[in-house]
Image (spheres, grey):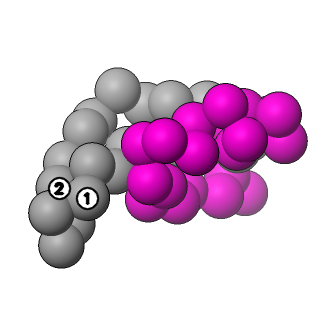
Amino acid sequence: MPVKIGAQAYLKKFYESFGFVDMGIPYLEDGIPHIIMVLQ
């Protein structure tokens, strides 16, 4: 079962190091850029 997270955009490389993939859906949460990431 995949794991889906909303990560702060500046931590993208950190999450990618664990195998998460950016789904290319940026959004703002409390004025902070976030991205949807998924781990298969």
User: Closest to the observer: 23 or 27?
Assistant: 27
Q: Mark on residue 28?
A: 2
Whether label 2 touches label 1, CB < 8 Å: yes
Q: Is residue 29 magenta?
A: no
- The magenta stretch spans which residues? 1-20
Percent x, y for residue 35?
38, 44
Q: Residues within 10 Å of mark 1 (few under 14, many from 20)?
A: few
User: Closest to the observer: 25 or 31?
Assistant: 31
Q: Secondary structure at mark 1?
A: strand
Q: Of circles 2 and 1, which is in front?
A: 1
Percent x, y for residue 40?
74, 41
Percent x, y for residue 29?
21, 66
Q: Residues within 10 Å of mark 2 (few under 14, many from 20)?
A: few
| Above or below, 20 relative to 27 | above
Instruction: Name the residue beneath numbered marker 1.
Output: 32
Between the C-alphas of marks 2 and 1, the distance is 5 Å
In this orientation, does residue 34 appear? yes
Q: Secondary structure at mark 2?
A: strand
| Above or below, 33 relative to 5 | above
- State left or right for residue 40 relative to residue 32: right
